[in-house]
Image (spheres, rainbow, N blue to C red):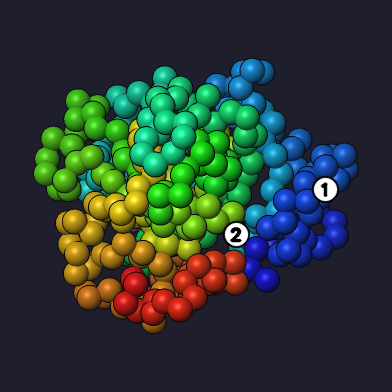
């Protein structure tokens, strides 16, 4: 089993419980009654408000999405980053993002849906309650981490905007603020950063919108105040500081595909058998570990998401 129950919770969470809303909720209620999780996860509320459960960091829901793997050191998660809007060195985002103002924030929802609009972040996330999920995170550069994200599943959020039958894809766009993001003053990439998913990928229960990590609001360098986390895909799909989400009929453009189409495809599923044109993807360095470890198919989430690619050649759809 790839998604393990938290060691502190009694009983056994079956994958079916994880994806079935019923099992999921009855388990939730049991955990809440038994006093597991929420208290242990309680952290200082950074922008909590009783009216906005979705941004309340003081009552993060326990989640069945956990791993039996050691968390990556928080210092590494917040100082070894890729966020080219702040520079291309791993230390640049932490160093040069101090003047970035993530709040207040709003998200524009547009395209093939019945409820487009410009939503304040609180309203965009309401009524979803924050939960914590521990996922593997694999960068295309062959390093990886294990990160405890705080956020909400993407699918239920998207459904609130009532996508119509033409909505085959979902596109995402990062904020464009060259004054606050020095990297955007250079043409490393064609700004703003854009990404996209097929709608069924976006609706998959593993797709996640993060607003925090390690029980706190996202640091600027990790994509404050709102970023995508798609754990079975290479890290560059997990777009940061999202200001716009669109439902589209055509496959949307993605930044790294535009920049180097031969090296980065639309799907970018983690695949140890499909090498990058310039390096092997068979192994990865887990940050904090000395020996390399084998990269897992779909980053270890093949049982959950393999079905999305039934009938597709993962070597061609990379
Ligand atoms: N807007 C934006 N999003 C981005 C990036 C970026 O440069 N700009 N880098 C991507 C890459 S390559 C990775 S590996 C992850 C890194 O996330 P982390 O710094 O939180 O670990 O963010 C992704 N999202
Ligand atoms: Mo990456």
Q: Quadrant of the C terminus?
A: bottom left
Q: Which residue is mark 1?
A: 26
Q: Please provide percent x and percent y for residue 134.
A: 59, 53
Between discs 2 and 1, the one toward the N terminus: 1
Which is nearer the eye, 12 or 142?
Answer: 12
What's the distance in space between the residues labelled 2 and 1, CA to CA?
Answer: 27 Å
Q: Residues within 10 Å of mark 1 (few under 14, many from 20)?
A: few
> Which residue reaches farthest front?
165
Q: Please provide percent x and percent y for residue 99.
A: 30, 24
Q: Nearer the viewer, mark 2 or mark 1?
A: 1
Question: Residue 70 has which mark?
Answer: 2
Which is nearer the eye, 204 or 148?
Answer: 204
Q: Is residue 226 left or right of residue 183?
A: right
State whether residue 242 appears in this view.
Answer: no
- Check whether the beta carbons of the residues at disc 2 and disc 1 lie within 8 A of each other: no
Question: Residue 164 has which mark?
Answer: none
Q: Secondary structure at mark 1?
A: helix
Q: Is residue 124 above or below residue 298?
A: above
Q: Is residue 212 above or below residue 270?
A: above
Q: Please provide percent x and percent y for residue 26.
A: 82, 48
The image quadrant in which ligand 2 is located: bottom left
Question: Which residue is painted at 54% across and 31% down in the image?
Answer: 125
Question: Which residue is painted at 55% across and 56% down in the image?
Answer: 204
Q: Secondary structure at mark 2?
A: loop
Residue 46 sits in quarter: top right
């Amino acid at each position: 089993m790839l998604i393990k129950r938290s060691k502190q919770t009694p009983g056994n969470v079956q994958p079916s419980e994880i994806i079935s809303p019923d099992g999921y909720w009855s388990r939730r209620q049991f955990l809440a009654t038994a006093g597991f999780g929420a208290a242990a996860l309680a952290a200082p509320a950074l922008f909590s408000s009783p009216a906005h459960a979705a941004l309340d960091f003081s009552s993060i829901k326990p989640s069945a999405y956990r791993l039996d793997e050691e968390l990556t050191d928080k210092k590494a998660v917040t100082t070894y980053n890729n966020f080219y809007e702040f520079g291309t060195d791993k230390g640049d985002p932490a160093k040069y993002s101090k003047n970035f103002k993530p709040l207040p924030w709003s998200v524009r929802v547009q395209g093939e849906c019945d409820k487009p609009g410009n939503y304040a972040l609180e309203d965009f996330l309401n009524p979803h309650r924050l939960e914590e999920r521990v996922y593997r995170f694999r960068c295309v550069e062959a390093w990886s981490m294990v990160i405890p994200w705080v956020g909400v599943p993407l699918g239920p959020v998207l459904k609130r905007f009532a996508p119509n039958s033409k909505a085959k894809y979902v596109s995402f766009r990062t904020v464009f603020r060259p004054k606050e993001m020095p990297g955007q003053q250079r043409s490393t990439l064609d700004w703003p950063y854009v990404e996209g998913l097929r709608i069924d990928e976006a609706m998959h229960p593993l797709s996640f919108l993060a607003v925090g990590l390690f029980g706190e609001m996202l640091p600027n360098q990790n994509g404050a105040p709102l970023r995508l986390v798609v754990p079975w895909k290479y890290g560059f799909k997990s777009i940061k500081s999202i200001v716009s989400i669109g439902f589209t009929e055509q496959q949307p453009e993605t930044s790294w595909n535009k920049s180097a189409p031969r090296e980065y495809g639309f799907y970018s599923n983690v695949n140890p058998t499909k090498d990058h044109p310039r390096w092997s993807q068979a192994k990865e360095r887990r940050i904090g570990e000395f020996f390399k470890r084998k990269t897992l198919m779909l980053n270890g989430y093949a049982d959950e998401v393999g079905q999305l690619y039934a009938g597709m050649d993962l070597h061609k759809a990379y």
